[in-house]
Image (cartoon, helix red, strand yellow):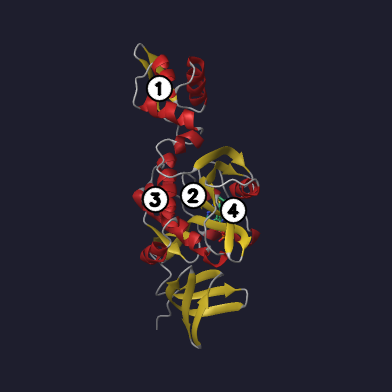
Amino acid sequence: MNETRHQVLDALADGPVSGPTLADELDISRSAVWKHVEALRDEGFEVRSDDAGYVLDSVPEFGASAVEYGLDAPFSVEYHDSIPSTNARARDLAAEGASDVVVLADEQTGGRGRLDRDWHSPSGGVWLSVLFRPDVPMAHAPVFTLASAVAVTRAAREAGVEANIKWPNDVLVRRGEEERKLVGILTEMEGEADRVSWVVVGIGVNANVDPADLPDEANPTSLSAERGEPVDRRLFTQRLLEEFDSLRQDTEQVVEAWREYATTLGQQVRVETPGGPIEGEAVDIQFPGALVIETESGTEVVSAGDCEHLRPVTE
Ligand code: BT5
């Protein structure tokens, strides 16, 4: 949303405000005010005009301006009802030089997980990618995957869903022994060894989605299924972005926060790494995101791989 539209919206929220007053305050023409109001109406904002002027009656459920409105983080939002993949779009924007942009979609038709796996993204989810340019070496970039897992976990908990993190990139809900996948995260980046050029953090949240529409083998769940009612996607997305914004600026606090929500620590795990499987007890996480595993033959530090939580062997 451009700066003037933002100002118009803020003024309407404090309304009633007349067209001429707004035009004076913002130093634009009356017809420009009218155009901004019409554009907001087109986006689903209900703007009433009465004798005293314009009044904002309601904000749309989802969309670019809806999420930007009242957002306490410096991101601009690009919204799509349907798009192949928000990560692919964010990569294109990165190539054009953009930064601090969030690509948000209601539905993805070609969503991707790690290793080019499919990510099912029916309408009703929160499918988003954050493009930014942190001033850090490439080796530190995995911390942003952890940061996004923490951010989404906090937002889910605020929405009443007791989410936990499974290393490295899953957010789950536990039911007894069972773990159900609520969120997947895919981080992509480009740069030189000593400096990241851009990072795209792709976060896929099963928000108001029926788990029956998602692949069975992942044991999926959704915010609406856990809550028994739909979540306010606008507020959820705002909280997620605000938490992420504060964590990305203070990466020191990320590992500590991650430990608080992790289910992986203390568990027997099997991690499929490019060099083969590693099995043992997950004992810690190290900056910027490596898992420390005690195996029979010593301590291993693993920076990437698919992690399986093994059931403890009971005798
Ligand atoms: C992930 O991959 O978990 C990362 C997913 C990232 C998706 C976001 S959405 C916004 C952005 N745009 C994109 O195109 N991607 C990102 P991975 O750990 O590889 O898990 C993939 C596996 O999860 C699949 O093989 C399925 O088994 C399962 N799966 C697919 N869709 C799912 C869903 N909606 N919920 C739960 N599990 C799912």
Q: Is residue 180 above or below residue 126?
A: below
Q: Hey, which quadrant is residue 190 in on the image?
A: bottom right
Q: Amino acid at mark 3?
A: Ala
Q: Which residue is mark 3?
A: 155
User: Mark on residue 25?
Assistant: 1
Ligand 1 lies under 8 Å from the Cβ of mark 4: yes
Secondary structure of the residue carrying numbered label 4: loop
Q: Which residue is mark 2?
A: 206
Answer with mark 3 or mark 1, whichever residue precedes in sequence: 1
Secondary structure of the residue carrying numbered label 2: loop
Secondary structure of the residue carrying numbered label 1: helix
Q: Badges 3 and 4: C-beta atoms under 8 Å apart?
A: no
User: Mark on residue 119?
Assistant: 4
Residue 9: x %, y % from top left: 42, 28
| Direction top: furthest residue | 51
Q: Hey, which quadrant is residue 281 in on the image?
A: bottom left
Task: Name the residue rendered at 59%, 53% in the picture.
Answer: 119
Question: What whole-number distance in Å separates the C-alpha atoms at marks 3 and 1?
Answer: 36 Å
Judged by depth in the image, the label closer to the viewer, 1 or 2, is 1
Question: What whole-number distance in Å separates the C-alpha atoms at marks 3 and 4?
Answer: 21 Å
Task: Name the residue rendered at 60%, 58% in the picture.
Answer: 189
Answer with mark 1 or mark 4, whichever residue precedes in sequence: 1
Q: Amino acid at mark 4?
A: Trp
